[in-house]
Amino acid sequence: MADVSAPSPAAQSGGAASAWAAALGRTLLPLVVVVGALVAFWYAACVPMNVKDALTQAERAGVVVSPEGAGARRDMSSWTLVARNTGELSGVWSLDRPRLPAPHQVAEELWSTSVGMALKGRMWSNRSLFTHAWVTLSATLLGFGIGTVLGVVLAIGIVHNRAMDMSVMPWAIASQTIPILAIAPMIIVVLNSVGVSGLVPKALISAYLSFFPVVVSMVKGLRSPDAMQIDLLTTYSATRAQAFWKLRLPASMPYFFTALKVGIAAALVGAIVGELPTGAVAGLGARLLAGSYYGQTVQIWSALFAAAILAALLVGLIGLVQRMVLARMGLAR
Amino acid sequence: MSLVLGSIAFWLVAWWVNMRIAASRWAGTTAARLCVPALFGATLLLVWEGVVRGLEVPGVILPPPSAIAVRFAASTDILWADFVQTFLKGALSGYAIGAVAAFAVALLADRYDFLRRGILPVGSFMAALPIVGTAPILVMWFGFDWQSKAAVVVVMVFFPILVNTVEGLRASDAMQRDLMFTYNASPTQTLLKLRLPAAMPFVFNGLKIATTLALIGAIVAEFFGSPTVGMGFRISTEVGRLALDMVWAEIVVAALAGSAFYGAVALIERRVTFWHPSQR
């Protein structure tokens, strides 16, 4: 997504500082506007979503709302209620169990269950998001590691063995079109019944999910050197091992990192879904499930955002390593 | 024990046959291309059957393929009802809505450069997130029936299609756009005759990624609450009853539906982007 448009006039006339400011304005400003619009939309959406509960609460507090009585309001449309009670709407952003929590409620919950608890010295208590995030993260990383190593090994086998290529590769590609995640509950329950529980079953699901993207892209990557380069190594009388270490493996690196990004996102989804059938013990998936059982919407949203932050950190970390490695290899775009 | 040894022997023989086919001069033919993976698949099934029967693995841990096939044949009516509920109602309607919405937003983002700069990073960011997590929220909002599943699918397929379409709309090169300009083509004409066709390989890439996501979204959303029909519902309840042959039968349905869906989109892609090098 490299930006190739011409530099703006400001960048040409001014010094480095104004060039920076121009670049910031071109990339950051639209982003801020779009994100701001999304947040504003979110706040606005809270009004019709939460109006019924908010009016019920206001009525209990003694405010006169129209029409009176929760029963009379039940079948009315949210918009009518909003229109008839424009003065009493402040409650929609501060309900205990809103249908749609306001952004600041989610942020507050996120803060108080993570950094807030850490500041009180209870970073690893059962209610802390750090605990749950770590449970999910450890399964994700273990599974991701297993899946990546196996995927790379299989890809090397496929590239070097024609029979394997012809027999395994079609299945590896076909398996990408199958909703593998559907078998997650079965793996969990079956492994539980043979006495394996906790980290390993979830890691296996993560491994399975991250395995196929790695295989497919690594095969592509290991085959990416063109015929000229391979011919050159043949004229050098290089062995297959030398060709692998000196040509195929370095050439596959861009593909490898792309696969890692897809793989880690898939592994995280696998770990989260893997936590669902175990009955909500620990982990971000368990927080989601427990929240949905007890109608704790703020908790669901904060778990969701925690998962999003985790995913962003993991993908960002791989992106960083990718940039460093590829720059060092001279492959950076 | 003899079953286990027999299946391992079959595996070795099949592998040897595959090696011979791959090394032979017919390796490039279509017959060999179909025969080798088919033989490999058959070997997997046979080894599975032989090992499970030979070691007497209980059916609650891993049922043999034959038992799954019998269960599949015996309960086609239940499987069909689940398929209709989850795939036709949940996944397919959500996929259509999500694709149309993503396409509309992509056109809008393409029209206004400012919007594109803002939407593209947000879209790529969202596409990497575990969006399945929105399932409990959407189930709470839209109820247990297929509407909530369709909503999850909409959110899941939206971002990959959006990002790919926006990228695709920029795929035509400057020479081609200049040519349209010299023809005095209006922006709409340029869009319809040059940039949309040029975007199609990217759009279909997004649509193909989204097929799997749609099915996953519809199935996982049912884990958070559903009527007493549906593939995700069946999987989670039958796992609870340790009726694993039924679970596997449901997984076979999911696999067939997923591949058929992907295949259908790939087929349409072939028709639409016949001019692209990868299709020739």
Image (tube, helix red, strand yellow):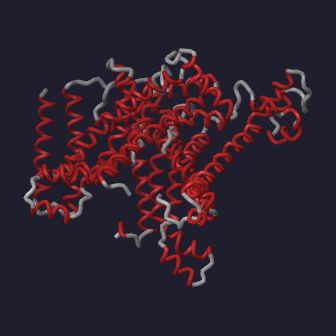
Residue drawn at x 87%, y 26% is A69
Q: Position of residue A117 (x, y in %)?
A: 57, 19
User: Residue B27: horizontal and vertical position, in percent?
Assistant: 16, 60
Question: Which residue extends farthest bottom?
Answer: B183
Judged left or right of residue B50, residue B220 is right
Q: Residue at x 49, y 57 (%)?
A: B164
B95 relative position to A73: left or right: left
Residue B21: where, in percent of width, then height?
A: 13, 55
Say which of A204 and A219 sits in front: A219
- Looking at this view, name the residue that lies furthest to the left: A237
**Quadrant of image for the N terminus of chain B:** top left
Camera-side residue: B65 or B127? Answer: B127
Residue B244 is left or right of residue A169, and the answer is: right
Residue B100 shows up from this direction: no
Q: Nearer the viewer, residue A293 or A44?
A: A44
x, y percentage for residue A62?
A: 90, 21
User: Up-down: is A121 above or below B210?
Assistant: above
Q: Quadrant of residue B7?
A: top left
Q: Residue placed at 64% from the left, 46% from the top?
A: A35
Looking at the image, can residue A151 be seen? yes
Residue lying at 20% horizontally and 25% vertically, measured from the top left: B55
Give the position of the C terminus of chain B as an image quadrant: bottom left
